[in-house]
Amino acid sequence: MKISTKGRYGVAAMYDLAMNYGQGPISLKSIAERQKISENYLEQLVSTLRKAGYVKSIRGAQGGYILSKDPAKISVGDILRIMEGPITLVDCLLDDSNDHDGCERAGICVTRDVWAKVSASIISVVDSISLADLCREEKLRGDV
């Protein structure tokens, strides 16, 4: 599994909004500058996050974007799923049924359980880290 710039930058943008949570709308320009992301690309990412209900847009001269939920209620896993789709190492794990349409060997594959365990571990980690956790870690490091 390789996380694309879409996933990485999506997490970075959401982290930036979380760091400024409760301070009013944040402009895309300021997020782009702080996170070193193209403003045009960031606009596409935030649009995806807005459609998923994680970000709200505020119009007007002092407008921008805010998180639609408390940072403690948004996990890195939530963001990665929105930006990247299901979190898994191999496609045969996407098939929840027992007929394994995606792979003719899935029913007899000895390594499928290995990939399932690794995927479950990754999911457990990214779901256990909230945006609030990332903000807390940053503040502890003293970089803010």
Image (cartoon, rainbow, N blue to C red):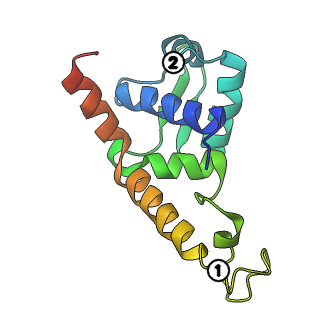
The residue lying toward the viewer, choosing from 87 and 52, is: 87
Query: Which residue is found at the position 78% from the left and 76% from the top?
Result: 103
The numbered disc on residue 35 is 2
Number of labels in the image equals: 2
In front of the other: label 1 or label 2?
Answer: 1
- In the image, 12: left or right of 125? right
As displayed, is residue 55 above or below residue 106? above
Residue shown at 72%/19% (left/top)?
40
Residue 118 falls left or right of residue 5: left
Residue 110 visible in image: yes
Q: Judging from the image, what secondary structure is the residue with disc 2 in?
A: helix
Task: Please provide percent x and percent y for residue 118.
Answer: 48, 62
State the image coordinates of residue 43 (x, y, percent, origin top left).
68, 26
Which residue in the structure is indicated by mark 1? 96
Query: Quadrant location of residue 89?
Result: bottom right
For badge 2, the amino acid type reads Gln
